[in-house]
Amino acid sequence: LPDGIIQSADLATGVGGKILQVVQGGSNTASSASVASKATQDTGIQVSITPSSASSKILLIATISGTTSNAINNFAMTLQKKTGSGSFADLTAANGAADGNRYLSMTGTYGTSIYTNYGVHFNYMDTAGSTDALIYRAVYFNSSSATRTFYVNRSHTDTNSNSYTRGSSWIQAMEISA
């Protein structure tokens, strides 16, 4: 079976598939950052989990809310992981397949309205690989040829009116016994 698949026989015998812990990280606070062309920016949306076993599976579920400062919004998100005191690195297995010059992201959207507060969503099952603390975070990629302002939990135009929205962004991590 492919990595991450738990057989129903395992569940019946109690070998795997039990949720051992659930944690959540994120924010409902609006923020913004200037992001250079072809650069990435940490969204500030992350979750930390310390697995009880290196063989555990970590199920990640997320919604990231926001937009950018242009009428054409490329809103691409990449999932990154940090183990213990290590550095953050892209979870390349979670990204799209390579094809030409396309940016490989976990999820994203392409829109044409600067008033929209987009929600991009993803789920992914990772193998813990360690009992050190694991931190997963969502990272924005500016695919534009110009610097853009990236907004989290708000639209580009943030007028104090019910015509505009503010959102929230969350990542849940569940440790599942293997």
Image (tube, rainbow, N blue to C red):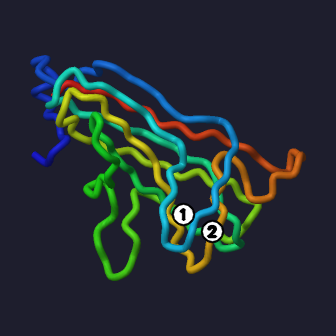
Which image quadrant is residue 13 in? top left
Calculate the distance from the C-alpha at mark 1 to the C-alpha at mark 2: 8 Å
20 or 151: nearer the viewer: 151
User: Residue type at mark 2?
Assistant: Asn
Where residue 121 is drawn, which disc sits there?
none
Taking 172 as reference, is 139 above or below it?
A: below
- Left or right of 93 on screen, residue 2: left
The residue under the point 17% across, 24% down is 53
Seen at 19% across and 41% down, the residue is 4
Q: Nearer the viewer, mark 1 or mark 2?
A: 2
Q: Quadrant of residue 71?
A: bottom right
Q: Residues within 10 Å of mark 2 (few under 14, many from 20)?
A: many
Residue 59 spot, x, y in % from top left: 32, 36
Dot 1 or dot 2, earlier in sequence? 2
CB-based contact (under 8 Å), mark 1 and mark 2: yes
114, above or below 138, in the image = below
Which SS class for mark 1? strand
Residue nearer the viewer, 126 or 47:
47
Q: Which mark is residue 109?
A: 1
The residue type indicated by label 1 comes to: Thr
Q: Which residue is mark 2?
A: 73
Image: 47 above or below 122: above
Res 48 quadrant in image: top left
